[in-house]
Image: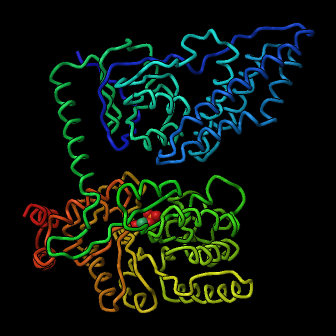
Amino acid sequence: MTIAFQGIGIPSSCPIALGPAFIDVRGRTRASQIPIAADQVDQEIARLDLAVDAARASLEAVRNQIPHSTPIKIAEFIDAHLLMLEDAALLEEVRRIVTDRLCSAEWALQLHRDTLVRVFDEMDDPYLRTRRDDVEHVVHQIQSFLQPDTPGSDLGSRDLNGFVAVSRDLTPADAILLNHRGAVAFVTEYGGPLSHTAILARSLGVPAVMGIQDVTSYLHPHELLVVDGETGTLLADADDRTLGYFRQRLRAIEARQRRLRELINRPSQTRDAVPISLLANLELPEDVETAKSNGAAGVGLYRTEFLYLNRSDLPDEEEHLATYAEMVADLEGIPITIRTLDLGVDKGATPVGDCGSSVCNPALGLRAIRLCLKEPELFRPQLRAILRASALGPVRLMLPLVTNIQEVDRVLALIAQLKRQLDRDGLEYDDAMPVGVMIEVPAAALAARAFARRMDFLSIGTNDLIQYTLAVDRLDGAVNYLFDPIHPAILRLVRMIIEAGRALDIPVSMCGEMAGDPRFTRLLLGLGLREFSMQPGAILDIKEVVLAVDTRELERRTDALYANLDDADPSELLDALNQG
Ligand code: PEP
Ligand code: MG
């Protein structure tokens, strides 16, 4: 009889895995309260220090095993834990508890852990709340050296090739070790989609299901498991039909991934030899490697928000520059489009307090370019850093959420002023660095020609353009059903923007999610789009469509679809375009 457990799915590049269970029962053990005598305090503190040293040595050993070719800088996750181990305040407090309460190091560590976890649990920011896991992991690491007899406190050196690793809690270090030993999936009792282990699983390409309560106690070692990271389901004791179904799905996924990998070196052009630029959207500097390994011709959107999030101060010019310079160097001549700060409700709170008078409706309020123009101390360091980065390689600057031409004129004047400043400071920049805007507000789409006249390029941000045109909050599940990329109004606006670019001979790209969805590729090519920017994992899917089509035929058929927009169901028109 198939038993299904439901957790939180982490799909990774391969969403499914089958394999025997390796059950790791370590993690989050509770210490018992053991009193000590006053003359034992020094000895107890020495025991704590030894355990901390051992935990540090074990983390450093894992860190040294990380291959340089690993796409994301996973060493940074380990460094975060090493830093916590170095944190004098953390250990000082534990030592104080041992001394004041005359208790064992294990108990003192647990008391301090409980206090820290409570602080994290009360945080509003979901990302920061998830950092409680790091406290848990570091405490667990020390505990496991204080109590070496805890069952299975060492992963040992076993070969786990093909196994599904089922753990109570998985530290990033353990996830790396398990992956090295050949584990094909992770299942955990604790953890969520924002945890470092989840981020790691994604970048290692290992599917995971997290947060299944008590799962380690329900499973038997070596029993065959099915992990579906897409739906967050774990199956045990599956019957033959179910297993057959998942095996077939896995084979199909693997075959498709092999086929797509073969496309990587083929020039991205249609059958009638029209070159199509396939670019990557990046959120973090580490994503550069993933963009390159998927054959991105450039970065069409680098979202710089991460530089501002989860901190109380603002990044200065040098910090901006260091980040951009490293990315430009890593990209080795591939162009990058750096979008200036686009903080708003959808990306976390604004980093400055005053949100103006429109706090009741923050999606329409002081966000993105509006915030930057109001808060020059936010904006200037970033603009100067982008200009300076342009001296190091091909860089484009992109402004989000523009509404009117006056905003653009103000930014262009500011850039001219900053260039004069840089000249005076003797700092280099590329005087011809292209400056473009994202068309995300319906008003800007309708006035696209005016923007095209002043800018070097346009980029269509469909995520916001759809939200604002259809009056649908993109984060609100209750109205999600209205979020429709092929609503006739959206198609008309998209076409209008592409035509404005053509009329003024400037490139137009699309960097909203629509660009990375193969269902829309034919339609967008037919509307005249030639530059698509998307999450790197989608590039080869889009390339597959590009290689198979003829733009002349698509343009003819899309014209017919466009002429029929008000008379037929757009989804039926789209299906017909995709089928034929
Ligand atoms: C968009 O709005 O389409 C876009 C790409 O920007 P973001 O999703 O970062 O708002
Ligand atoms: Mg946007």
18 on left or right of 383: left
Q: Quadrant of ligand 2?
A: bottom left
Q: Nearer the viewer, residue 470 or 497?
A: 497
Q: Is residue 467 visible?
A: no
Q: Residue at x 65, y 77 (%)?
A: 384
Q: Is residue 255 above or below residue 95?
A: below
Query: Which of the 4 image quadrants contains residue 38?
Result: top right
Q: Residue at x 50, y 64 (%)?
A: 303
**Residue 489 percent location from the top left of the image:** 27, 75
Q: Quadrant of the C terminus?
A: bottom left
Coloring scheme used: rainbow
Q: Is residue 35 above or below residue 414?
A: above
**Residue 26 percent location from the top left of the image:** 55, 18
Query: Which of the 4 image quadrants contains residue 239?
Result: top left
52 on left or right of 468: right
Q: Is residue 555 above or below residue 42?
A: below
493 on left or right of 97: left
371 on left or right of 405: right
Q: Quadrant of the N terminus?
A: top left
Query: Which of the 4 image quadrants contains residue 264?
Result: bottom left
Q: Is residue 95 visible?
A: yes
**Residue 497 percent location from the top left of the image:** 32, 82
Q: Is residue 575 above or below residue 276?
A: above
Q: Nearer the viewer, residue 329 or 257?
A: 329
Q: Residue furthest right?
A: 39
Q: Residue at x 54, y 47 (%)?
A: 73
